[in-house]
Amino acid sequence: MNGRQSAPQRICLLGATGSIGRSTLDVIARHPQRFEVSVLTACSNVDEMARLCRVHRPELAVMADANAGGLLAKAIADIPETEVMVGDKAIAQAAAMSDIDIVVAGIVGSVGLAPCLAAVQAGKRVLLANKEPLVVAGELLMAEARRCGADLLPIDSEHNGIFQLLPADYTPGLQSSGVERLTLTASGGPFRRRDPGTFATITPQEACRHPNWSMGEKISVDSASMMNKGLEVIEAARFFGIEADRVDVVVHPQSLVHALVQYRDGSMLAQMGNPDMRTPIAHALAWPQRIEAGVKALDLVAVGQLDFEAPDEARFPCLALARQALASGQAATAALNGANEMAVAAFLRGELRFDRLATVIEQTLAAMDHAVASGLEALIAHEREAKRQASVFIAEWSR
Ligand code: NAD
Ligand code: MG
């Protein structure tokens, strides 16, 4: 389809006030004939949402928080074309609306699962930044995408890189495509070289100061603990339908090589670029075409050197915890995600030490029986139970 000749594609942006939301709106603004913002959703940031509504004039704005929705309706009462709705259900309904072409999933956390699923079941093109739904129920989400004919495209940078590197006829199962292994790179986060003896005193501010990427608080803490890479190994295994032991992680502090694919014949292909989420977002918005994203080309001579090293799993135990959960199955990864969400939130509130993030997750995983049914409701209930369980351990540690 040529977006420049036909009507603009209509976009529903979930998590419009966040970091992914901001990058997406920047790319869209570069292509007004091609894309149009139809729906914006957010949690509670009324001021930013009101500002975005003034700029983009969407047909619908949804706030998850009911009180925030009331305030937004007042704040934009002078914009008659924008209807305001509230609540989680309204967000999921918006993602499945018949006049929407593309849904950008930029909500943080497993709360994004319901709207992702709704968008997939409505057969939309879905750009998935929100990795937690894949960690909680990825096999189901992927199966629904196949069943409903949805284009589910990864925009997490590493997974988008892999997607770009795989052959066009790639199908999960690998053998026929000649793909042997996938590699995700990791920056190593802000504490790659910090003395682990001082991890107990790490502040939320220090953890959120990522060396290469500017992102929301939760993913910044995940990057600092390297749980982000653990979640991404699960995401890659589920998204590309590949065994966990064929997904490698290598630390690459410059964050210029995002992903690599090893082929049977000895070739290793790399996807590179400046660390800027607008590249994967533009790639997936226009796929299979290529559009301008506002990102400068990489200057290899100026870069000079690329470094790679093995991840230090003793320093960052979350990576091994994620691999263990992946080996145990979907219920265990749902529990891992729930425990991590609670632990990170407690750390950000100043109620849990940084070095206890992994402890709480490990305690939660050990306290639960993961041999449960694999249906959606069971997985959601299992994650909820993990959150409850984790909050008990968090309360014990904060005493
Ligand atoms: P962020 O915190 O900057 O933004 C989160 C967005 O989600 C906000 O718009 C917020 O209003 C919305 N939100 C939060 N809680 C909600 C709720 N209960 N209901 C509805 N909406 C809610 O986060 P981010 O950095 O943009 O990350 C978003 C997702 O994308 C995460 O899953 C993250 O792991 C993933 N991701 C982000 C980046 C990045 O560069 N920021 C890169 C790769 C993947
Ligand atoms: Mg990533």
Image (cartoon, helix red, strand yellow):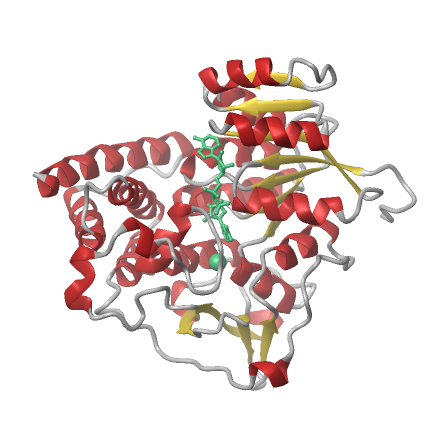
Q: Quadrant of residue 211?
A: bottom left
Q: Is residue 251 left or right of residue 368?
A: right
- Name the foreground residue: 383 vs 108: 108
Across the whole image, how many numbered discs are drawn on residues? 0
Tell me, yes or no, if residue 68 can be seen here: yes
Q: Percent position (x, y) of residue 249?
A: 40, 70
Quarter of the C terminus within the rendering: top left
Residue visible at 71% across and 57% down in the picture: 293
x then y, percent, for residue 182:
49, 70
Image quadrant assignment for residue 232: bottom left
Left or right of 7 in this view: 363: left
- Vertical order, 327 against 301 (above or below): above
The image quarter containing residue 83 is top right
Q: Is residue 217 left or right of residue 177?
A: left
- The residue at the point 61 percent across, 62 percent down is 163
Nearest the camera: 352 or 71?
Answer: 71
Near-viewer residue (344 or 199)? 199
Q: Residue at x 71, y 32 (%)?
A: 56
Q: Is residue 65 above or below residue 19?
A: above
Residue at (62, 36) in percent of width and height: 13
Using the image as rendered, state which of residue 96 and residue 370 is in the foreground: 96
**Relative height, residue 233 to residue 338 (above, below):** below
Q: Position of residue 290 (x, y in %)?
A: 77, 60
Residue 165's place in the image compared with 36, above or below, is below
Q: Position of residue 309 (x, y in %)?
A: 38, 80
| For residue 286, side relative to residue 246 (left or right) | right
